[in-house]
Amino acid sequence: MPGFFREHLRPLAGSAGLHLLIVAALAVAAMRWTSPNPPAQLAIEGVVVDGRSLPDSQRAGRPKQRPEPQPEPAAAAPAPEPVPAPDERRKASEQAEQEAALRVKAREEEAKAELAHRQAEAAKAAEAQRKRQAERDAQSKAKADEAERREAAEADAKRKAQAAAAAAQDAKVKSDREADLRRRVAAEAAEEEGAAAAARSGAVDEYRSLLSQAIERSWIRPPAAKAGLECTLFVSQAPGGTVVDVKLGSCNGDQSVRESIVNAVYRASPLPPPRDPRAFERRLEIVFRPTE
């Protein structure tokens, strides 16, 4: 309701003012029609006589009189306005009311048309704003999708590059491992072949006897050692004869004897080199038989 009054305030104010003017006009007309007619004014006619026109006999002996001022003609009374008949007044009032109603209706129609026009313009503006917003949203979404696709492509390329690098690294490690294995196999084969050749030539037996003598020289014989002592030793040595590890196999001595023999191997390090380099072995099996 407040919106309706704001939209139709001007037409309603105009209609009210027009009705007030009509009522005022009718009241003035009624007052003139009911007021008595003014009394009729009588016109007085007069003749002005000039003394010069009189005969000399009449003018002689008369005192010279001053001419009297002529009265100004009376202003004609305004003619009374014709008072319309009651039927005519009623028809005029009805016609005025109809015209006022038509003007009010026309103003209302004009206000409605203007309101409809404003609403249509507002709807058009809202639709245009919605379309612009939809376009901006579509552009933002397209940019976000493109950025996401670009990031996904970069991430995929990075993963592929990392996988390729890892595969290349694995291939290199595998190749290096295989090459190292081939080198070791070849070295072991050469070592075995050299050992076999040395064994055939008696250099291995000579080398083991040399090692057994070096160990016996470093052995501190315990009191519990008996005649006929025989112990098998598994010795690991580095190039140059440095003893890396010693394990004791079968042995007919007690614990003190066994420990004394292991300590003797470590005291003998570095072990003497063989006369024939082909007889050198990293892992040795030595049968320790001390002399009596």
Image (spheres, rainbow, N blue to C red):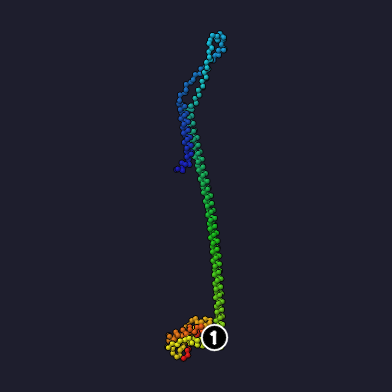
Image quarter where the N terminus lies is top left
The percent coordinates of residue 34 (x first, y second) are: 45, 26
Q: Residue 256's image quarter?
A: bottom left
Residue at x 54%, y 57% (from the top left corner)? 143
Give the total number of marks visible in the rendering: 1
- Which of the two residues, 75 or 138, is positioned nearer the viewer here? 75
- Which of the two residues, 202 or 17, is positioned nearer the viewer here? 202
The percent coordinates of residue 78 (x first, y second) are: 50, 24
The percent coordinates of residue 260 (x first, y second) are: 45, 85
Work out whether residue 100 can be spotted: yes
Residue at x 45%, y 43% (from the top left corner)? 2
Residue 64 lies, with reference to residue 28, above or below; the image says above
Residue 35 lies, with reference to residue 117, above or below; the image says above
Residue 214 lies, with reference to residue 98, above or below; the image says below
Residue at x 53%, y 13% (from the top left corner)? 65
Q: Secondary structure at mark 1?
A: loop
Residue type at tag 1: Pro
The percent coordinates of residue 172 (x first, y second) are: 56, 73
Per the image, the residue denoted by label 1 is 274
- Mark 1 neighbour class, 10 Å CA radius: few under 14, some 14 to 19, many 20 or more: some
Residue 26 lies, with reference to residue 133, above or below; the image says above
- Which of the two residues, 162 or 114, is positioned nearer the viewer here? 162
Work out whether residue 251 can be spotted: no
